[in-house]
Image (cartoon, helix red, strand yellow):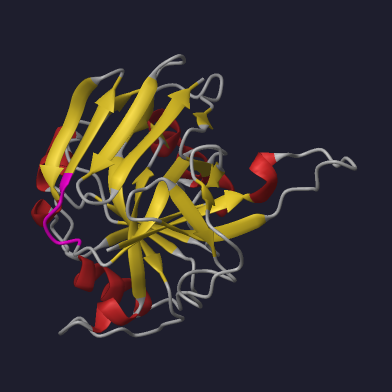
Amino acid sequence: MTRYVRFEENGGARVRSPERAEPRERWGRVSEDGESVTPLAGAPWTTEAAAGPAIPRSPLALLPPAEPTKILCIGRNYKAHAAELGNELPKEPMVFLKAPSSLVPHGGTVVLPKDAGRIDFEGELALVIGKRCRSVPREGDAWKDVVFGLTLAIDVTARELQKRDGQWWRAKGTDTFCPLGPALVHGVEPGDLLLETTLDGEKKQSARTSAMIFDVPTIVSWITAAMTLEPGDVILTGTPEGVGPLSAGQRLELTVERVGTLSVQIA
């Protein structure tokens, strides 16, 4: 298992000065003890070549660990979640899109739009694509050739807008509605991992990914039957029961075993 992070060099500085250069986005490989990061010459699915000496991890300004052209999401992929919202179980994967501009990093802030009504959290395991692909077979381990690794995602949803608009572009794609991170983890099987979400320390969701209606091979095959996926694209695999509303001032955390913990503030 190997962890990678995407970060801003120069500590996230955003103002040019003679003493401090404009930050640039880099990928890095996290050390086994988690204390340092070795910068890479490119994205981890393209190279493992180091681009400099290891640096301390603690002060780094983390970015979402993917640079997607699109974010695809699977709806109603846990029976209990479909039931809690009063929805029928899907007979085939139910796919919708979130905008890449909705991404927020670990430690970032989800901003609740005014007058949008109820806004819910949905904790999910996410896949990051590492190879351009189309028509990936469902059988065997073909999906492993195109999915580089796993990360964590929160599908923030404006529930009333979801019902009102028909199309979910605002309900799902509003700015800050897709926290992602903190790391991209390579070498972990996604089929049976414990997923838990807490809100201000209170456990709200707890389920294993083995409870998904459509597993990862099925999801990848279904999506790529219609759409070409590019390196860096992200797939959210669905949320279990226990979703609920968010309020300004709360702290939301999602943990998936062996993958990590994603934490964001609500404002």
Query: In the image, what residue occupies the spot 49% across and 44% down?
Result: 57
Expressed as whole percent of the image width and height from the top left, the position of residue 264 reads 43, 30
Query: In the image, what residue occupies the spot 29% across and 72% down?
Result: 220
Q: Which residues are magenta?
A: 190-194
Expressed as whole percent of the image width and height from the top left, the position of residue 64 reads 50, 49
- Please tell me whether residue 73 is drawn above or below residue 266 in the rendered image: below
Query: In the image, what residue occupies the spot 19% across and 47% down?
Result: 257
- Please tell me whether residue 199 is drawn above or below residue 133 in the rendered image: above
Query: In the image, what residue occupies the spot 36% across and 71% down?
Result: 148
Count up the numbered dots. Answer: 0
Q: Is residue 130 visible?
A: yes
- Please identify the dominant SS of the magenta region: loop
Expressed as whole percent of the image width and height from the top left, the position of residue 42 reads 57, 70
> In the drawing, does residue 34 fall left or right of residue 210?
right
Expressed as whole percent of the image width and height from the top left, the position of residue 51 reads 60, 68
Q: Is residue 67 visible?
A: no
Give the camera-side residue of 100 and 74: 100
Q: Is residue 192 magenta?
A: yes
Q: Is residue 19 magenta?
A: no
- Please tell me whether residue 25 is drawn above or below residue 252 in the rendered image: below
The outermost residue toward the top is 249
* Residue 149 figure quarter: bottom left
Q: Quadrant of the N terminus?
A: bottom left
